[in-house]
Image: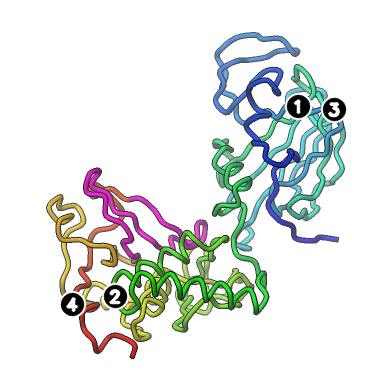
């Protein structure tokens, strides 16, 4: 029976240890990191014309190998060549029938799952071995993108180990918090906003930062998702049907996805939780660009002298909140509900080139007492 699990490193390590300790250094017999050029044939070094597609964990024969996240077993192959015995999982993050990531576990001594099985994070897939083209017992581990191209696993492994936000590891799950935990989270949010200044642009920035980077999980993107109340919504992460018409390519009308916020919903939520009245004016591209009638061109270098945290980053069909201005590098850090693959997070955007086109200046709005909650 399928039981959803938590994000996990593919092989268990000791308390206080780092997964990288098992990739290179004393604990690893032959360090093999992502991109390593060494080629092996029949267990022997053959040339330096290869590109290592994953990372190799040096562990004893028979060590349990587990799934890093919930997924579907799409390959479970027994072989004496190449990868040897290996398992490949597809990870459908958005419940739309499409895999945003794949993970692969190779050179296993045995396989404990079969094709078509749904696997929970942390569930055993097999055991470490040395089958196929291998120099000794180890786990060859890969992460692949939605097009099945290998990518560096390090950011994902770091995110799992550190408990940080990453789309593969820790989107908010349905009812993952009890009512008492939600109350504690909302209290921490209120404290952060009050410390920054309730009813100020600084308070809005504090609210945006809290949801985008200080919560221990990532709030999902849900097209049409709005929440004009204070605090977090206990329904976030629960499957709901997209009702907006038209929907998006990843979230068409009638499809089912974990509930959360869309881009304007997140901005409205942050403004509301920063000490301002609930509003709907931020819904819709035309309403957004005319929100204050004060704006500057994103790509104008001189604009950075007019922009402050709390101003809004805008382009056709998308909006976010600038939470930090870095004049030295001419960059803006934007809190945004970026899309189905990423959820709510903070991104760094150069003023010399970005998907954003315009910055909406918010002094007039933030300084108007009529907009503030009493």
- Where is residue 24, by image quadrant? top right
Q: Earlier in the sequence, mark 4 or mark 1?
A: 1
Q: Residue at x 74, y 13 (%)?
A: 43
| Magenta stretch, residue numbers | 320-348
Compare residues 231 and 36 and report the one nearer the observer.
Answer: 231
Mark 3 touches mark 1? (CB < 8 Å): no
Figure check: 66 above or below 289: above
Is 339 magenta? The answer is: yes
Foreground pick, 294 / 44: 294
Quarter of the figure that contains the N terminus = bottom right
Give the mark nearest the N terminus, 2 or 1.
1
Q: Earlier in the sequence, mark 2 or mark 3?
A: 3
Residue depicted at x 64% and y 56%: 92
Counting from the top left corner in percent of width and height, residue 358 is at 22, 62
Image location of residue 75, percent across then percent down: 76, 42
Secondary structure beneath disc 1? loop
Type of secondary structure dominating the magenta stretch: strand
Q: How many marks?
A: 4
For marks 4 and 3, give the CA distance.
66 Å
Q: Which mark is residue 61?
A: 3
- The residue identified by callout 4 is 364
């Amino acid at each position: 029976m399928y039981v959803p699990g938590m994000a996990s490193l593919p092989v268990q390590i000791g308390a206080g240890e780092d997964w990288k300790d098992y990739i290179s250094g004393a604990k690893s017999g032959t360090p093999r990191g992502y991109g390593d050029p060494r080629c092996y044939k029949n267990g022997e070094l053959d040339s330096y014309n290869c590109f290592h597609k994953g990372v190799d964990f040096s562990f004893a024969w028979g060590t349990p190998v587990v799934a890093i996240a919930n997924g579907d077993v799409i390959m479970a192959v027994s072989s004496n060549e190449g990868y040897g015995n290996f398992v490949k999982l597809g990870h459908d993050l958005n419940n739309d029938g499409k895999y945003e990531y794949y993970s692969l576990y190779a050179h296993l001594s045995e396989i404990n799952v079969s094709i078509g099985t749904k696997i929970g994070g942390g569930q055993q897939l097999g055991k470490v071995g040395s089958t196929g083209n291998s120099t000794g017992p180890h786990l060859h581990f890969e992460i692949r993108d939605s097009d099945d191209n290998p990518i560096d696993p390090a950011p994902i492994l770091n995110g799992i180990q550190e408990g940080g936000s990453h789309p593969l590891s820790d989107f908010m799950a349905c009812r993952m918090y009890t009512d008492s935990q939600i109350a504690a989270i909302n209290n921490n949010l209120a404290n952060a906003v009050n410390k920054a200044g309730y009813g100020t642009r600084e308070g809005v920035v504090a609210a945006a930062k809290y949801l985008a980077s200080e919560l221990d999980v990532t709030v999902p993107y849900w097209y049409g998702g709005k929440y004009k109340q204070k605090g977090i919504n206990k329904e976030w992460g629960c499957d709901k049907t997209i009702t907006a018409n038209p929907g998006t390519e990843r979230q068409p009308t009638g499809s089912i996805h974990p509930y959360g916020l869309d881009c304007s919903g997140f901005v409205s939520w942050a403004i509301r939780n920063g000490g301002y009245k609930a509003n709907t004016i931020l819904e819709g591209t035309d309403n957004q660009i005319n929100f204050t009638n004060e704006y500057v061109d994103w790509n104008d270098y001189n604009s950075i002298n007019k922009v402050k945290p709390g101003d809004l980053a805008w382009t056709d069909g998308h909006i976010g909140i600038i939470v930090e201005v870095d004049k030295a590098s001419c960059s803006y850090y934007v809190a945004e509900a970026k899309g189905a693959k990423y959820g709510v997070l903070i991104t760094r955007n150069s003023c010399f080139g970005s998907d954003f086109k315009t910055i909406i200046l918010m002094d007039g709005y933030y300084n108007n007492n009529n907009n503030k909650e009493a």
